[in-house]
């Protein structure tokens, strides 16, 4: 048997092995090393099986048989990562992050689409909430199933998060990691990269102070000439809204003063913030149900006193639509607080 035929036999086997290797490995330098090592093992085993030490088609076929099927060899390289349910521990943070982002998008789309229907009179107020809940349930369940199946498949193939990055990006992150270690910057043991600050304290403090000022203004309502023209019920709603804004501002100020430490305290504050935001929705709903008390202040002629003309009935739907958008924004920022609670959990264990 000629050397050429033996080489062709080995190459055909290696070609089959290569076709079964996981995709994350095929475009890397390692796959060439794997195939070269396999070829060396085949030739060594064939020489052992030969009585004369010469390679023949028979002992090469026996050596290949000893190596196992291409599927069994490829399977060894797919056993990569630490098992965690059906998704590897390495992909788990990405899985949760993708779920969070997609859920937020689904909730946002459901809220916006139903609010638009409400503005144009396609649904009434109670149908609005029923459709929102139904849309969120269906959207979240279907996307959960799809995303979970994708990540289970990726885990079975042995993918790591870095396999989705280009070589240039991996090299850049490696350099950043080395620099961070030299400078003593905290490093995530899961992602193996420098950790960004949990919050920017100055920005959070400024935002908290602004919210406190706005909240106090709404509670005190220090302009008697204006407040005397406004419906007392609407003034009460404003004061409740100011109370919620004030409390949220105090909570934000507290987080800013704590800074990038005491992450359990951050989680408690975010939990309280979620309760405050959800409670504030009730005030917006009450306003939504009473558009006739919303003030529209104007002056007929220069020098004339202010008058309150209120909202014309034909604009009630627009008013309710704006209130619905405010509720949607509150819900989305509440989702962000849930995410920050999850994010703070990871920061507890940084080294």
Image: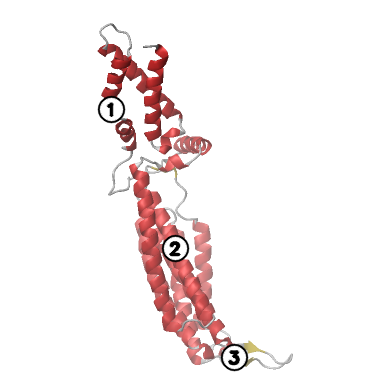
> Which quadrant of the figure contains the C terminus?
top left
Q: Position of residue 31 (x, y in %)?
A: 42, 29
In this figure, which residue is indicated by the disc labeled 1? 68
Task: For mark 2, give the secondary structure.
Answer: helix
Residue 312: assigned label: 3
Q: Residues within 10 Å of mark 2 (few under 14, many from 20)?
A: some
Residue shown at 53% from the left, 60% from the top:
203
Image position of 225 (left or right of 327): right
Spatial separation of the CA atoms under disc 3 and disc 1? 81 Å
Q: Is residue 196 above or below residue 314?
A: above
Q: Residues within 10 Å of mark 3 (few under 14, many from 20)?
A: few
Pick whichever of labels 1 and 2 is earlier in the sequence. 1
User: How many numbered discs, if any?
Assistant: 3
Residue shown at 46% from the left, 37% from the top:
177
Q: Nearer the viewer, mark 1 or mark 2?
A: 1
Whether residues under marks 3 and 1 lie with C-beta atoms below 8 angstroms apart, the answer is no
Whether residues under marks 1 and 2 lie with C-beta atoms below 8 angstroms apart, the answer is no
Whether residues under marks 2 and 3 lie with C-beta atoms below 8 angstroms apart, the answer is no
Pick whichever of labels 2 and 3 is earlier in the sequence. 2
**Which of the two residues, 200 or 142, is positioned nearer the viewer here?**
142
Residue shown at 47% from the left, 82% from the top:
123
Q: Is residue 124 above or below residue 162?
A: below
In this figure, which residue is indicated by the disc labeled 2? 104
**Which of the two residues, 8 or 138, is positioned nearer the viewer here?**
8
Task: For mark 1, give the secondary structure.
Answer: loop
């Amino acid at each position: 048997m000629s050397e050429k035929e033996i080489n062709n036999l080995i190459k055909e086997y290696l070609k089959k092995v290569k076709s079964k290797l996981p995709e994350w490995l095929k475009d890397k330098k390692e796959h060439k090393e794997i195939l070269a090592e396999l070829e060396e093992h085949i030739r060594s085993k064939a020489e052992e099986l030969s009585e004369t030490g010469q390679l023949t088609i028979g002992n090469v076929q026996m050596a290949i048989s000893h190596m196992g099927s291409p599927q069994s060899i490829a399977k060894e390289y797919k056993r990569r990562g630490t098992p965690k349910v059906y998704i590897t521990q390495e992909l788990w943070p990405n899985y949760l992050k993708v779920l969070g982002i997609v859920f937020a998008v689904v909730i946002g789309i459901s809220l916006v689409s139903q609010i638009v229907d409400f503005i144009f009179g396609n649904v009434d107020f109670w149908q609005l909430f029923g459709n929102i809940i139904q849309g969120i349930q269906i959207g979240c369940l279907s996307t959960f199933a799809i995303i979970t199946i994708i990540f289970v498949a990726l885990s079975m193939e042995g993918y790591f998060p870095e396999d989705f990055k280009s070589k240039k990006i991996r090299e850049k992150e490696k350099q950043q990691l080395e620099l961070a270690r030299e400078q003593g910057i905290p490093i995530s043991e899961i992602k193996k990269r420098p950790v960004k600050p949990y919050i920017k304290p100055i920005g959070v403090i400024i935002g908290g102070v602004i919210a406190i000022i706005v909240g106090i203004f709404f509670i005190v309502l220090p302009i008697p000439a204006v407040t005397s023209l406004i419906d007392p019920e609407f003034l009460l709603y404003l004061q409740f809204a100011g109370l919620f804004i004030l409390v949220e501002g105090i909570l934000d100020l507290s987080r800013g003063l704590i800074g990038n430490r005491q992450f359990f305290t951050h989680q408690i504050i975010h939990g309280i913030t979620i309760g405050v935001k959800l409670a504030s929705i009730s005030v917006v709903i009450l306003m939504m149900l009473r558009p006739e008390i919303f003030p529209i202040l104007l002056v007929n002629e220069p020098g004339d006193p202010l008058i309150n003309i209120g909202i014309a009935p034909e604009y009630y739907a627009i008013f309710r639509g704006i209130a619905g958008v405010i509720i949607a924004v509150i819900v989305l920022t509440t989702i962000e607080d849930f995410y920050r609670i999850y994010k703070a959990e990871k920061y507890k264990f940084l080294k």
